[in-house]
Image (spheres, rainbow, N blue to C red):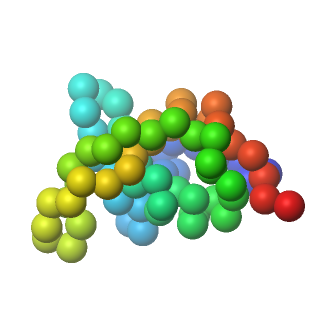
Amino acid sequence: MRRLKEILLIKDATIHKRQYDKEWFFKFDDVAFYLKEDLSEVEFIYLPIMIDGEEEVVKCCSFKDILRGRKELK
């Protein structure tokens, strides 16, 4: 399993993200692609995020949610 640090997700330009009340939320699909892992156990919520100049409501998860629900693809 790939080691993960929140600062790397925040700095990665390929992952759409948004900060709410000092906590970062990351677009679920972007994180799954970045990690190449099964994130089906990760809890998520729907939040508006700016994607290509338009605001879209997408599945998002926090860094803590990702750490709790990670499992490696076989």
Across and down, in percent, residue 59 comes to: 38, 50
Lateral position of residue 38 relative to residue 47, left or right? right
**In this rendering, position of residue 61 left or right of residue 52:** right
Which of the 4 image quadrants contains residue 65?
A: top right
Above or below residue 45? Residue 22 is above
Q: Nearer the viewer, residue 65 or 5?
A: 65
In this rendering, would 48 be left or right of 43? left
Q: Is residue 12 visible?
A: no
Where residue 22 sits in the image (x, y, percent)? 29, 28
Residue reaching furthest right?
74
Name the residue rendered at 62%, 48% in the picture.
40
**Looking at the picture, does residue 18 appear above or below residue 55?**
above
Residue drawn at the location 78% of the way across and 59% of the way down: 73
Q: Quadrant of the C terminus?
A: bottom right
Considering every residue shown, the one lying at the far left of the view is: 54
Task: In the displayed orientation, state which residue is furthest to the top.
Answer: 21
Residue 10 appears left or right of 39: left
The quadrant in which residue 32 appears is bottom right
Report the number of numbered marks.
0
Q: In the rendering, at what x and y percent does residue 62 appear?
A: 45, 37
**Residue 12 location in percent, x, y?**
44, 61
Above or below for 14 versus 49: below
Residue 63 shows up from this direction: yes
Identified at 45% across, 40% down, the residue is 44
